[in-house]
Amino acid sequence: MGCGCRGAKYAGGQGQGFPNLLANNFPSGTLTRMKLHTLLACLFLTTSLAVAADVPRIAPAEAAKLVAEGKAVLVDVREPREWKSSGVAAPAVLLAKSDFDGEQKEWKGFLAKVGDKQVLLYCASGGRSGTIATKLAAQGIKTANVGGFKDWANAGLPVRKVEEEK
């Protein structure tokens, strides 16, 4: 049946289909720019959602279980001042996001040694850890976002103090 656009009479002309109606009633190039902007926006959103979908978010209790079983490594990606002020998850490796975004002095060695274990990341709220998890997943590293340190602590999982800044 269709939408009835083909052969319908519009103010823009007789018997033209909807695409021709649009093309004939917009200034030259406007429709092309509109289509391009819409297409780019759709591609960006689709790609963002697809990448985000590749990185699962798991509960702290599940993360603790995977670490205890030797299947995963837990990484705190917050900054040293945050580690010192609030403490960290007891089994966490401390690797700051600033190092990940910079020269990766500590991250490179860690990633070389992690092997086939899953890399579980957390930060203060889950934002920074999600960003790094997405980048690691793009490199083919199996990863997950555990969320924020408060989620770990509120789950009653073990924490430890950090005395010295790295």
Image (spheres, rainbow, N blue to C red):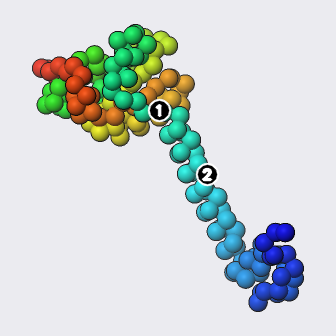
In the rendering, at what x and y percent does residue 93 appear? 30, 18
Name the quadrant of the N terminus. Answer: bottom right
> Is residue 7 left or right of 143 when viewed as pictured?
right
- Which residue occupies the foreground of this view, 55 or 34? 55
User: On residue 43, which mark appears?
Assistant: 2
Front: mark 2 or 1? 1
Label 1 is placed on what type of residue?
Pro
In what element is the residue under mark 2? helix
What residue do we see at 56% from left, 51% from top? 44
Question: Residue 31: x percent and y percent?
Answer: 69, 72
Residue 132 image point, x, y percent: 41, 33
Residue 133 picture quarter: top left
- The residue indicated by pointer 1 is 56
Q: What kind of residue is marked 2?
A: Leu
Quick one: label 1, few (<14), some, or many (20+) residues within 10 Å?
A: some
| Residue visible at 48% across and 33% down in the picture | 55
Of 139 and 19, which appears nearest the observer? 19
Residue 35 shown left or right of residue 60 in the figure: right
Real-space Cα distance between discs 2 and 1? 22 Å
> Can see residue 103?
no
Q: Toward the viewer: 37 or 49?
A: 49
